[in-house]
Amino acid sequence: QVQLVESGGDLVQAGGSLRLSCAASGTIFSINVMRWYRQAPGKQRELVASITSGGNTNYADAVKGRFTISRDNAKNTVYLQMNSLKPEDTAVYFCNAVGYLRSYQSFGSWGQGTQVTVSS
């Protein structure tokens, strides 16, 4: 009922920048929290950053000062600006959203992921 579509992943050199986008669509009433996770090969999925509808943000220690999460509530879209990229940032990045449908039923949805590869 809620679809998330990520975009913006690419191959970039260390020190470079990328901007990821994730657009939510469906019978959405509200989205309380939007998050970015990442999963590197052979590792568990980890939370990268989150943002509430009011704009409160949280970041993993590994990305603080380099990544910035933002959202456009009118477009139901979340962004992740990634600067000073490192090879260890290489992973599939997933978008997650939780909120309520127009039926007032709660939802939690994941995107399909977008690959970010940082070369040294």
Image (cartoon, rainbow, N blue to C red):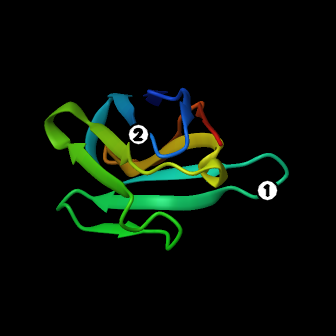
Q: Is residue 54 above or below residue 92?
A: below
Residue named by callout 1: 43
Image location of residue 46, percent across then percent down: 63, 60
Taking the image as drawn, is residue 57 in sight? yes
* Helix, strand or loop at mark 1: loop
Q: Quadrant of the C terminus?
A: top right
Q: Going by the image, does 81 lie left or right of 3?
A: left
Q: Residue at x 19, y 61 (%)?
A: 55
The residue type indicated by label 1 comes to Lys
Q: Nearer the viewer, residue 41 or 66?
A: 66
Sequence-wise, which precedes: disc 2 or disc 1?
A: 2
Looking at the image, the residue that sits furthest to the right is 42
Q: Nearer the viewer, residue 93 or 95?
A: 93
For residue 74, which quarter of the picture?
top left
Image location of residue 70, percent across then percent down: 26, 49
Q: Is residue 72 above or below residue 8?
A: below
Q: Nearer the viewer, residue 110 or 78?
A: 78
Residue named by callout 2: 17
Q: Residue at x 17, y 62 (%)?
A: 54
The residue type indicated by label 2 comes to Ser
Spatial separation of the CA atoms under disc 2 and disc 1: 23 Å
Q: Residue at x 32, y 30 (%)?
A: 27
* Helix, strand or loop at mark 2: loop
Q: Nearer the viewer, residue 107 or 78?
A: 78
Q: Is residue 88 above or below residue 25?
A: below
